[in-house]
Amino acid sequence: MKTKGLYFRYLIIVVAVAAICVAILFKMARTVFVERDKWQAKAERPLYDTVSILAPRGNILATDGRLLATMMPRYTMYVDFGADGFNKDTFERYLDPLCQALAQMPGDRTAAEYKAHLLKGQRSRSRYYRISYTRLSYVQKKQILEYPFFNQQNPGKTGLVFEELMSRDRPFGLLASSTVGSVYINSEGRGASGIELRCDSLLRGVNGKRIKQRVQWQWVGDILTKPVSGQDVYTTIDVDIQDMAESALMNRLQELQADYGVAIIMEVKTGAIRAIANLDRQPDGSYKEGVNHAISDLLEPGSTFKTASMMVALDAGVVTPDEEFDTGNGLFQYGGRSLRDHNYSHGGYGVITAAQTIWYSSNVGISKIVLKGFEKDPKKYVDGLYAIGLNKRVDLGLPGAGYPIIKYPVNEDGKANPSWSKVSLPFMSFGYEVLIPPIYTLMFYNGIANGGKMIKPYIISGIGENGHVSRRFGTEVVTEKICKDQTLKEIRQMLVDVVQHGTAHGRTAVSSDYVQIAGKTGTAQIHQGAAGYKGNTVRYRVSFCGYFPAANPKYSGIVVVSNPRVGYPSGGTMPGAVLRTVADEMYARGFLPSKETMPRDTLYAKMPAIKSGDAKSILSVCQSLSLPLSSGAKNEYRNGWASVESKDYPIALKSLTPNTRTVPSVIGMGVRDAIYLLEQVGLRVAVEGSGKVVRQSIPVGRRFTRGEKITIVLK
């Protein structure tokens, strides 16, 4: 019995071992033949983890090389309360002045809140304790290193650690921001809109890799592959013209309380966009850059489209500028619909010439002209619009662009277009039942200014790196000749007369004492979806499109104002006034040729306003303008800072001697000198207004803490 029991035990062991061997053989066979690729990939994978090194994103630059978007280092600040050498006694001794300094900058807590926050971290001996969520600039980082307790030479005693992050910065703030675009706030920082999105693959570059090892809250380790920097994108934007356009549009929108506004300025000969502003009304009534309405909005252009209708009629020979049309009392019944002029309640225009239908923007007049020539064959009218190139799609170099929609009377199969009605022809003649983005309307008017050659607007002028442009983009022709030479001559005269005699005439509209502007006003009732044009509240979109100087055009422009809440809707006094303001300022700042050189007034010469500031610069300007200086000013103030003591003849200066202990006076200085002087002594500056400094928040002579904030007000 005993032998038999041992036999069964050995048998069980043998069977178990055999089963294990079979399982091992099965697993080996599966690994070799079935899972071979999987284990091969694991074998080839490195024995260490890696982390990406973000490639520096390329810059977006203005036409003169100034930065519109760039990468800047930003820093977040932490304290390692468990660091070797951290001195608790010194920390507690300097805690109060440290918190007072932190309350000034970064300033996201009060001094008492900072104290409670830091004591909490010190009690817990946290190794990675965030002081503030503010992303600091390099200058701010250097200032913080001079704060009490943090200013020790051995950083181990303070535990202060800065983590560097790369941030996408716009040196000019929100200037042209909807066109420049934005990036996603994440580790990759990919383009989200505008040029940042359109050129993302060029701007982004190629990330590198390094061995993953973290020391003192920072990634370190050998670099496996170096990152390749992104390329730079050069634009046609002129920062100064952009600023003029945005400022003029902003001021007008605030007066009108409109929903949004658009302003575009384009160079006539090249098609380069020098300014493109899109300002949206915010819930608090302010305005800022938002949706790029200039390229994306499909709008019924209204009366600016009458110029295209007149061009088609003149080219087809169905009308002459002097031919008369009876517009009656401003009401015209056609196809069961009523067509009205804007002054129908005042008796209309009566009998006017074809040219005057453009001057006065007569809906009745232009519809009668188009019906006279194309009522029996409306295809010829639309063919004429197509011949101009108004329906052509162009690549504007920006995402989200819309394309013109100009319907045709018949479909491709030759059958009648169901969206074409009896009244489509007359309504199209004055800008309804067609959809055109503002930038396409500008492209058409720019063609008129450019001698009949319609060219594509463009905003990206080149690609390059390290200051070298490797690829350039330029002018592209859309339509070589939009109309006959005689037609062009007649149209241009009509657009001049709109400003001199018609709906854009007047000092509160487009008429300028300095720059002759030609163009056309437009007013269109806004379609309100299911309610059509008869919603509870009638809303209008007003526009003006034209060019200047009229005789020798250098720039073209369009301004659109949507749903103004104040005043009677008028394309002349609302958007037209914006374009006039921009043209006048461009003239004053030398962007346009002047009419003549005015003789110097030697009898009543006015003393120019002189700002305080750098003494050497003041003397240089005064000497260049031949302004009389006192003997003391000539000899004593060659260096340093000075204020203007006398504004009469001769000019006297008073020396300014700032020190690093008390607040200096910057009253009367320009913003550049004021900021430089205040930052030189250790203050952090905030600016309000423009002009010269009239007030400073910290009185002159008061002692201050380094890094303290001072606000200067300019007028």
Image (spheres, rainbow, N blue to C red):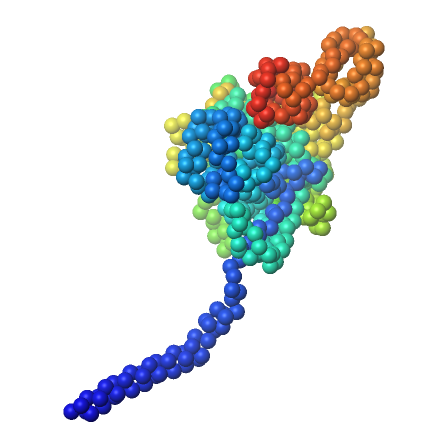
Q: Name the residue located 45 percent from the left edge and 29 percent from the top edge.
A: 115
**Quadrant in which residue 577 is drawn:** top right
Q: Position of residue 394 (x, y in %)?
A: 61, 47
Q: Name the residue located 60 percent from the left edge and 50 percent from the top edge.
A: 55
Q: Nearer the viewer, residue 554 or 612?
A: 612
- Please tell me whether residue 471 is drawn above or below residue 1 in the rendered image: above
**Quadrant in which residue 438 is drawn:** top right
Q: Name the residue located 31 percent from the left edge and 83 percent from the top edge.
A: 17
Q: Position of residue 707 (x, y in %)?
A: 58, 26
- Residue 392 horizontal side relative to residue 624, left or right: left
- Please tell me whether residue 598 is drawn above or below residue 194 in the rendered image: above
Q: Position of residue 101 (x, y in %)?
A: 53, 27
Q: Position of residue 599 (x, y in %)?
A: 82, 15
Image quadrant where one finds the C terminus: top right
Q: Nearer the viewer, residue 712 or 588?
A: 712
Image quadrant where one finds the N terminus: bottom left
Q: Name the residue located 66 percent from the left edge and 40 percent from the top edge.
A: 61
- Residue 525 horizontal side relative to residue 56, left or right: left
- Please tell me whether residue 692 is drawn above or below residue 8 in the rendered image: above
Residue 196 seen from this side: yes
